[in-house]
Image (spheres, rainbow, N blue to C red):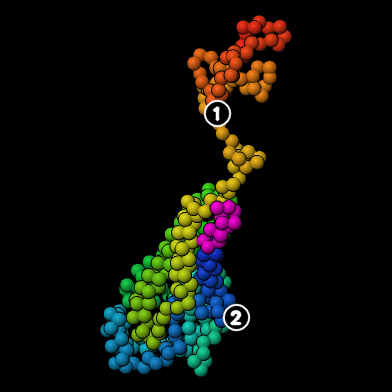
């Protein structure tokens, strides 16, 4: 298969690699630009405080919520006072969307969510609800239960690993796009690209698993604790579709890169001149240790019988067996030596 076949073989994994890169970029761009509705819909988790006024009074409902959440460190009166504080605080938005680099906040009007501002992108970002709600960490731990501090510490550490995993996946996928060009010309290029593709797939998979598991756990723990205050916790949809599509494209690209290392050679089967002469006929090689006499086409010697028992395909002359050498007055008994191939 020639170069055209090699290009066709590389085309499929190359396109899959670009598709995976686009999906990773979409994950990274989520919650970074307030004016983009598309990017605003890319978030891992949302804290919805728009219904916080529903629990403003000291009712038996708040007591039931505390019992369901397992929070025994605060009373219903304290919860009611905290809710009243949230209502009076004009800086608290209706919802908060958490992304990879930061978060966005906005308000809900007539059932329509409008993002007002987004934070500047920050490496190894993690969402700190105490700073958003205007509460100290000690007060937040008291309000949400003793296990909340441990949960937040785990979330902080895992968020850093998740950010690093996405960053490595992005860099490795970009390297695939560059190395894929060299894979067109040789299988060695495909081999190097395959190694980088495996690294990209593993880190993309690790980042996707981390984000999905971590925020699913956060939804369960935070959702239960914040439900007491009328806060709802929901997972995003589009960003998880994007991250798992990146995993699927990366896996498929890795498979086809591996396939290109053992198939679709770029060499042409008609380009080996050492096996053919200029007219296209096959050049026969002489076997070792054979002797070839100079035939009749090279006078004055003519055809002759071989010496020392070696035979040729030439028949003996009809009149005599030996032709004496007469050139340059050489002796008549001399004979032509045989050539050694």
Residue 312 in the magenta stretch? The answer is: no
At a point 60% along the width and 80% down the height, the residue shown is 35
Question: CA–CA distance between discs 1 and 2?
Answer: 80 Å
At a point 34% along the width and 92% down the height, the residue shown is 58
Task: Kindly indicate the quadrant of the structure image that contains residue 39.
Answer: bottom right
In the picture, measured across the screen, residue 27 lies left or right of residue 144, that is right
Q: In this rendering, does residue 145 appear at all? A: yes
| Residue toward you, 254 or 1 | 1
At a point 56% along the width and 74% down the height, the residue shown is 32
Which one is in front in this view, the residue at disc 1 or the one at disc 2? 1
| Residue toward you, 117 or 180 | 180
Q: Main secondary structure of the magenta part?
A: helix
User: x%, y% of residue 10?
Assistant: 54, 58
Q: Which residue is mark 2?
A: 35
User: x%, y% of residue 250?
Assistant: 47, 63
User: x%, y% of residue 125?
Assistant: 49, 68
User: x%, y% of residue 115?
Assistant: 55, 83
Label 1 vs 2, first from the N-terminus: 2
Q: Which residue is mark 1?
A: 286
């Amino acid at each position: 298969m020639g170069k055209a076949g090699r290009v066709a073989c590389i085309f499929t994994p190359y396109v899959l690699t670009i598709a995976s890169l686009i999906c990773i970029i979409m994950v990274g761009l989520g919650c970074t630009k307030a004016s983009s509705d598309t990017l605003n819909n890319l978030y891992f988790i949302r804290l919805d405080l728009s219904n916080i006024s529903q629990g403003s009074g000291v009712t038996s409902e708040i007591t039931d919520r505390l019992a369901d959440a397992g929070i025994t460190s605060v009373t219903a009166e304290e919860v009611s006072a905290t809710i009243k504080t949230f209502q009076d605080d004009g800086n608290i938005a209706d919802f908060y969307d958490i992304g990879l680099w930061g978060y966005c906040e906005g308000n809900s009007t007539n059932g329509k969510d409008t993002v007002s501002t987004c934070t500047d992108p920050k490496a190894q970002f993690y969402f700190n609800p105490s700073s958003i709600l205007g509460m100290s960490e000690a007060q937040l731990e008291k309000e949400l239960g003793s296990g909340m501090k441990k949960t937040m510490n785990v979330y902080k550490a895992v968020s850093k690993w998740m950010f690093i995993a996405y960053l490595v996946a992005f860099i490795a996928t970009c390297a695939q796009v560059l190395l894929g060009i060299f894979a067109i010309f040789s299988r060695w290029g495909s081999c190097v690209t395959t190694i980088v593709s495996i690294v990209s797939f593993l880190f993309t998979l690790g980042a996707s698993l981390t984000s999905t598991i971590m925020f699913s756990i956060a939804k369960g723990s935070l959702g239960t604790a914040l439900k007491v205050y009328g806060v709802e916790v929901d997972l995003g949809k589009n960003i998880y579709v994007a991250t798992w599509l990146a995993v699927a494209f990366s896996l498929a690209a890795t498979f086809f890169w591996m396939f290109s290392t053992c198939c679709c050679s770029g060499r042409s089967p008609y380009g080996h001149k050492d096996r053919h002469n200029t007219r296209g006929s096959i050049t026969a090689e002489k076997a070792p240790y054979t002797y070839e006499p100079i035939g009749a086409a090279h006078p004055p010697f003519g055809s002759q019988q071989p010496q020392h028992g070696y035979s040729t395909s030439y028949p003996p002359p009809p009149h005599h067996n030996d032709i004496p050498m007469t050139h340059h007055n050489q002796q008549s008994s001399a004979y032509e030596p045989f050539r050694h191939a």
